[in-house]
Every structure is written in C-alpha cells, then in structure tokens.
Amino acid sequence: MARPLEGIVVADLTQNVAGPFCTQILGDMGAEVVKVERPGRGDDARAWAPPYWGDESAVFMAMNRNKRSLALDLKADGGPEILQRLIARADVFVQSLRAGAIGELGLDFAGATRINPRLVYCSITAFGRRGPLSDLPGYDPLMQAYSGLMSVNGHPSQEPARVGTSIVDMGTGMWAALGIVAALRQRDATGRAVEVTTTLFETALMWVSYHAMGYLGSGEVPQPQGSGTAMIAPYQAFPTADGYAMIAAGSDALFRRLAAALGAPGLADEARFEDNPSRVRHRGELVTALSRLTRELKTSDLLERLRRAGVPSAPILTVDAVLAEPQTRESGVLVSAPHPRVPGYTSIALPILWNDARPEVRRVPPALGEHSTDVLTWLGYTLDDVRALRAKRVIQ
C-alpha cells in the first residue's frame, strides 16, 4: 500500500472545497487526518446538494475520504482546549477560517507554535494577508471572475462562463498540500515550525499565467477561444457528421499528418498554413477548410483515422461516458470501499502511483462527529470526560 505520509497527524480546521481537498490529498498519502467540524451542521459542503448519493452530498463525499470527523463547538467551555490538545499532537495544522477568526481563538501561527514548536502550520486564504482585499472572503467563482479566468473561458460574444469545476479551490488545495509536504521535509531538517500560506486569488492568477505573459509581451488583451487556444492551430473541437471531436495538432509535423489523414495533404504546403504562427494568423480560413473535411465523417470514423495517423484527438465525452470508458476502468483510478450508508461507494483516486501502487480508501467520508469519541480518547480524555462533554454539547 502506498502511504508515504503514514504516521503524520493532521489537524484539519477547514471546510468547503480548497482546504478539504488539501487534507484529503494528505489523507490519501497516509496521514491521519482529524477533521474538526461544527456540531449540528458541520462542513458547509455537507449541505451543497443536490446531487446527493443516498443522503450524502456528492461534493462533500468527493473531498473528505480518509479522515475522521470530530464535531466540536469551539465557542463552548472546553472546546478550544480540545483543539489545542489536538494541535499539540499534530504534525500539521491546516486552517481556512475567515481573516481574524483564527487569531480570536489564539491559534494564529504564533499561538499554535507556542503549543507545538514543531508544527507545520498552513493557512488557506482568499487573498492572503497583504493588499486592500485581504479581509474579504473568497469563493471559487469570485476568483475565476476576479483573476481574468472567466474572461478567457467560453465563446466570444457570449455571457461569461465559469470553468465547470472548482478549479481554483482544488488548485489551491493542491498548492497547499505541496507546500505542506515540502514544509515537513524542512521541519524534519531543522526541528522548527514552518508556516505555509496559499491563496485562492494567487492560484487563479497562476491558471492565467501564460495569458498574462502574452499580454505583457504583446499588449493584446486575451479573448475567449471556445474549445481552442489562442497560440496553437488547429487545437480545438471540429464538427463531424454526428457531433464533434477534439483535434490537437500541436506541431507542424502533426499538422502534416492531419492533412494527409483527411485526404488533403496539400493543405500543409500552402504558405498560409506552413507553420504554426501562419496557421494562427489564418485560423478562420484553416478552421473552415478542416471543418469541411471533418463534417464528412462520423466521430468514431474520424477518430479512428486520426489515431492511425498518430494525430492527437479525442471524443468529447459526458461524465457518464468517461466513467464507463475502458481506459478509466483499467487505469485503477476508480476506487471503491465498503460504506455503511452508501452501497456501491466509488470515488476518483489520487492520480499518483508510488512504486506502481495507488493509495486506497482507508476511511470513507465520515458522518458528522462519527469519530468524536475515538479522537478524544486518543487525546487522553476518559470515557467519563467524553460523556460529560457530550452532555454539555461541546462535542457531538
């Protein structure tokens, strides 16, 4: 079993997508993750539905496997002390509270590292600590809008379109996990605490980095390209007799193969199409010429022809279709585990192999407070203590 972070304890005070995705990555890698949630409703993502799977939010289930849930009221007497005990035992503390809220708990970097001088402390923020927007909250679509990402998505002359997944949230979670893994190495070398900070806004800017470089170099404001990209042609969806197919002829050699596969090798010899910069300048003429040829073929026939010629291409699949694809099934990226509330539970695994082994689902996404007793006894509380805390509604 691939568990490179086995033995690492993570205290997880995050919710929604970015933070939970970060800690799920750490949990998939073998860390022991304790997810701290509010009694009563827990992580907001538990209510982000429909769609449900059984009675569970699909969004919550996608971001919270390989964790234990501790339902803890941090405003009740004894609540902060429990979190402090957890931080004292942890290697990593990940928090995504609003600006100022973590300080009110006395658990900013300075406060938390007084409790645990070897702690890796990760803050997932909207805009970071600097700048005029540093106190504002942030959500994925706001960052897609604010960063320029929505301005280059979708089709020209249509209303702005959000990328159809939480790409900024999940990207921020990935950066946070990468920063934490690097910080653990640094902590182990120095014996001292390390602070890691990442932001939704900066992640969104990273996703438009080559658009930004293009603007800085040319002064031209990037525009939406539909299924294509501004700097390569042909590199987009083309119509077929029964739908569309994606074609990515990203080099001059591939364009020659494409033209030959479509029965029009002479296209590659025309001056207006002779190299990629020329094809980009004459994109409209190129798309018209190629579309006339692709429309004559069914999608499956076109793709078979292009693959034989070594031209990168793909069908444009719906989610149900891609889940049924042999490549998906045989890759092992769909992982299943027994689930007490959801028969047939399956999820998308961490897309990394260690020595050809993929991390397994050790724990399915937890019910709210499912592990409160286990976590508290592990922290040194007696069962009588736990019963008292439950009676006072400090825990659920």
Image (cartoon, grey):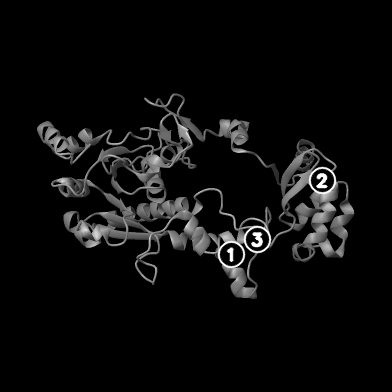
Contact, mark 1 vs mark 3 (Cβ under 8 Å): no
Nearer to the camera, 117 or 20: 20
Relative image position of residue 374 (x, y in whole percent)? 22, 33
- Identify the residue at horizontal 65%, vertical 72% (top origin): 220
**In which image quadrant can residue 382 be found?**
top left
Residue holding disc 2: 294
Q: Amino acid at mark 3?
A: Pro
In terms of image quadrants, where is residue 71? top left
Earlier-in-chain disc, 2 versus 3: 3
Tell which circle, 1 or 3, labels the residue nearer the N-terminal end. Answer: 1
The amino acid type found where label 2 is placed reads Thr
- Tell me the quarter of the image containing the C terminus: top left
The quarter in which the N terminus is drawn is top left
Residue identified by numbered label 1:
210
Closer to the observer: label 2 or label 3? Answer: 3
Q: Seen in the image, is 5 located left or right of residue 50?
A: left
Of 267 and 244, nearer the camera is: 244
For the residues labelled 2 and 3, the Cα–Cα distance comes to: 23 Å
At label 1, counting other C-alpha atoms closer than 10 Å, the crowd grade (few under 14, some 14-19, many 20 or more) is few
Q: Secondary structure at mark 2?
A: helix
Identify the secondary structure beneath mark 1: helix
Q: Position of residue 188 (x, y in %)?
A: 28, 54
Height in image: 390 above or below 244? above
Disc 2 to disc 1, how far (Cα)?
A: 30 Å
Between the residue at mark 1 and the residue at mark 3, the CA separation in whole angstroms equals 14 Å
- Image spot of residue 167 (x, y percent): 50, 52
Task: Determine the image quadrant of residue 303.
Answer: top right
- Nearer the viewer's eye, disc 1 or disc 3? 3
Q: Residue at x 53, y 59 (%)?
A: 207
Which residue position holds label 3?
224
How many labels, in total? 3
Q: Which residue appears at 47% of the width and 53% of the height?
A: 171
